[in-house]
Amino acid sequence: MMRTPALSGALLATSPLIFGTLARSASILFTDATIVTFNDETRKTQILENASLLVENDSITGIYDSPPAHGHDVEVVNASGKIITPGFIDTHHHMSQSVMKTLASNSTFVEYFQRYGDFSALTQAITPEAKYLSSMMGAFELLAAGTTTVLDHAQGSASFASAEAILNATLDSGLRNMHAFSVRDNIPNYTVADQMATLRTFSQDPRVLANPLVEMGLAYDFFEGSPENVTRGLWDIVKSGNLSVITTHFISGTWRIAGNPPTFLDSLGWLDSSVPVVFAHGTYINETDKEILRAKGHYISIAVESEMHFGHTIPFADEIQDQGALAADTHFTFEGSMISAARLWLQHTRLKYYTKLINSNQVPGTSPMSVDQAFYLATRAGALALRRPDLGVLRAGAKADLVVFDGDSPNMVGWKDPVAAVILHSSIADVEAVLVDGNWVKRDRKLTYKGHDDIKRRFKEAAKVVQQSFAEMQWPPLEGLFLNGTQIGQTQRMDVLPGEGTGY
């Protein structure tokens, strides 16, 4: 970590950190802040103390060691005692799942496929209106926690109407969204050809082309075994539609699903273009796949909490972190905070390598992973995975996507290291403000979206309908073979009660 002065500038008086009611100011000047960024030359986290940061329209135009001279049209924000970081970047998420929240608290990956996944009766029955509201609430959750960019593996559509509803939420939300429309086999009454036509339509939608926060992408999970005409047709859409990203689930191994390894996509020529390919999970990644990612500059997305929650596990992702970024994934089963994801991944990785040493009859004298590395994976690495060098960093020319933390909250006050304060001590409650593209999306700990209360009210009504539908559905027992492949087993269940009963 580096602590360095910012660029020089002139002194001026400032006002307290009191946020107004407008969602956007043409220019915003933060003064006296602790700024956390990444220095590409030294390849280290860089801390700027008592610094000023100027936002003009959608970009950062300067960082100074004292406030620069400015006109009367500049909104000045006294950020003394505050920590300003880049907005967090989530490289794998299913935004439309909010409406199923808490239904899968004790679920497994096998059960996910049966009850909550893209092909489940529940997901297919959710109305387009509910999917719009669900996607909006998902975006609000991410923005409230300081996530400013998401790669949405946009599943959940059962028809053009529901696909359009999810896209409409993407356009409305104020979140920077790489909207990777999911083309899938076996969706009733919505063929692969229909879905490909939908993707073409969306890529040419004037609203998408005019929205600086939304870029279209492709999500596809069936590369191995797909007819050549399908993959060729999809590649044509990627190029002709000027898509910005491709993403695929990559699990394989014992699961025998999502066999979309980098080696196979490389054999198709998909890793040789300027379009980034993000491989979600990388559960059973091998050495050849790792080397291809390094050689071709593509990334895996580590969704540590879903990989622990559902049981598909994360045995090898720590070995390819140099081509890795972090994700929240399924926020309907746990909170969608990237700070939580970074903290959990940090401690998971530490535990793994501590255990290795302990098992060799040694005790650890060093920590295997630092808070700076976890912070990097949740910010700058995500930007590089998406090939957006103007994101995940605070510097002149970067997009004005940033988070303001309250450094004086009960759990953060007294900090010395701002990165440790954010990664190990902060909570969503400490996120005072968030800017996306120079717009205030959260101010004074409140989301600025004008229709937020109405969206929330309608969403709660939609959630009740989904919950009732779920309660009325009958599910066969989870036994036999999973998708005609691997035997389904039963875990040992924990007992937390003395005497009779387990408390499960």
Image (cartoon, rainbow, N blue to C red):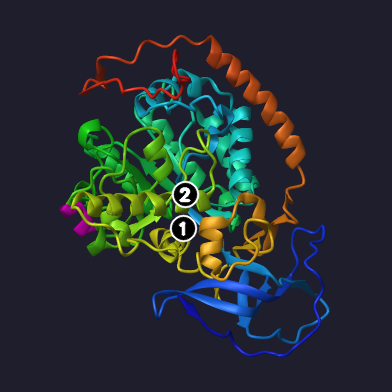
Residue at x 63% of width, y 39% of height: 137
Residue at x 47% of width, y 49% of height: 341
Q: Residues within 10 Å of mark 2 (few under 14, many from 20)?
A: many
> Mark 2: which amino acid?
Ala
**Which quadrant is the N terminus positioned in?**
bottom left
Residue at x 36% of width, y 58% of height: 275
Q: CA distance from mark 2 to mark 1?
A: 8 Å
Q: Position of residue 416 (x, y in %)?
A: 57, 71
Q: Is residue 289 magenta?
A: yes
Boundaries of the magenta span: 287-292
Residue on which disc 1 sits: 378
Mark 2 or mark 1, whichever is nearer to me:
2
Residue on which disc 2 sits: 341
Of 233 and 244, which appears nearest the observer? 244
Q: Is residue 394 above or below residue 246?
A: below
**Disc 1 secondary structure class:** helix
Tell me the tag on residue 66. Answer: none
Q: Residues within 10 Å of mark 1 (few under 14, many from 20)?
A: many
Of 439 and 159, which appears nearest the observer? 439
Contact (Cβ within 8 Å) of mark 2 with mark 1: yes
Q: Is residue 427 visible?
A: yes
> Mark 1: which amino acid?
Ala
Q: Position of residue 463 (x, y in %)?
A: 63, 25
Overall secondary structure of the magenta section: helix
Quick one: which residue is furthest to the left in this view?
288
Of 473 and 78, which appears nearest the observer? 78
Image check: 47 left or right of 55? left
Q: Position of residue 147 (x, y in %)?
A: 56, 53
Image check: 317 left or right of 237? left
Q: Is residue 146 above or below residue 466?
A: below
> In terms of image quadrants, where is residue 32?
bottom right
